[in-house]
Amino acid sequence: MPMFLQASEDFKGNSLYFYDLNAKANYRINDKNRIFLSGYFGRDKLGFGDNFGIDWGNQTATLRWNHILNPKLFSNTSLIYSKYNYDLKVSSGGSAFNIDSEIKDWNLKQEFQLFSNTRNSWRFGFNSIHHTITPSRFENSNNEGSSNQVSRYGWENALFVNNTYAASPKLSIDYGLRLSAYTILGGDTYNIYDRGLKTDSVVLAKGDFGKTYTYLEPRLSASYRLNPQSSIKEATPAIRKPALVEQFHQRQPH
């Protein structure tokens, strides 16, 4: 596409391209241990000379260690990195402005799989994610109305357990429970609202812990196989119930 744009006098100086790159590799250490590495990198860009330009993209990489503890118990330990960002540039009438935003995550996930018998298989473990969220930043070449929003940080943790029960050759039931918590981390000023109105603000220095929101999430689903080609599935939506613990308001880390 860029080649055809440059071939026309009307579109010279414009740009349009995208790419998607996938990569996978694995290494067998021994009969009980294997390492997997995968990555995805993608980008899209559109530009009309110096007047307008937008580009956005995703990056993600996963390092996973698979370990066989015994014939019935397996372990998967994953370290996952992901990043999404976009950049918008507009120039008109001698002035220019730029808007960009970014979300970046580091994710540690530990999952165990237990095949206790022919009818029951269990999944349980924990998940811990560090979020870096940079809201839209506006920059003006004339420094009028420009804003430089600092990044905000959050720490998401969860414990989970799930069982798949084969009630019959045709009926399978899945049920489980997830305890999740999201903690606000310091580094910015946070506003407090009551029914949409700002009532106060809290300054959290870097290294401070803000409020923690904790939820219990029960889950239930069932699947009935009508024939080799068709099945009926029913699931209850994940219900988020506030747990008893809600703490860490401006608490200093240990």
Image (cartoon, rainbow, N blue to C red):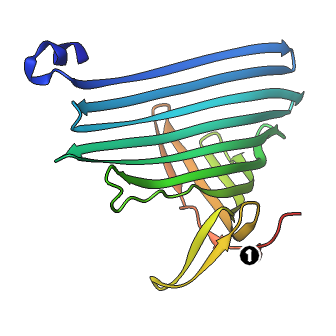
- Name the residue type under label 1: His
**How dense is the environment of label 1, judged by Cα within 10 Å: few (below 14), some, or many (20 and up)?**
some
| In this picture, residue 104 sits left or right of residue 106 | left
Q: Position of residue 237 (x, y in %)?
A: 53, 61
| Residue closer to the observer: 155 or 236 | 155
Q: Quadrant of residue 207?
A: bottom right
The residue wearing badge 1 is 249
What residue is rendered at 26% in x and 44% in y? 90
| In this picture, residue 214 sits left or right of residue 197 | right
What residue is rendered at 63% in x and 51% in y? 131
What residue is rendered at 73% in x and 35% in y? 78
Q: Position of residue 44 (x, y in %)?
A: 36, 30
Compared to residue 1, the image places residue 237 above or below, namely: below
Q: Can you see residue 1?
A: no
What residue is rendered at 73% in x and 56% in y? 158
| In this picture, residue 189 sits left or right of residue 84 | right
Q: Position of residue 209 (x, y in %)?
A: 75, 66
Q: The residue tagged with tag 1: helix, strand or loop?
A: loop
Compared to residue 210, the image places residue 85 above or below, namely: above
Quadrant where the C terminus is found in the figure: bottom right
Q: Can you see residue 75?
A: yes
Compared to residue 213, the image places residue 235 above or below, namely: above
Q: Position of residue 58 (x, y in %)?
A: 48, 35
Number of callouts: 1
Quadrant where the N terminus is found in the figure: top left
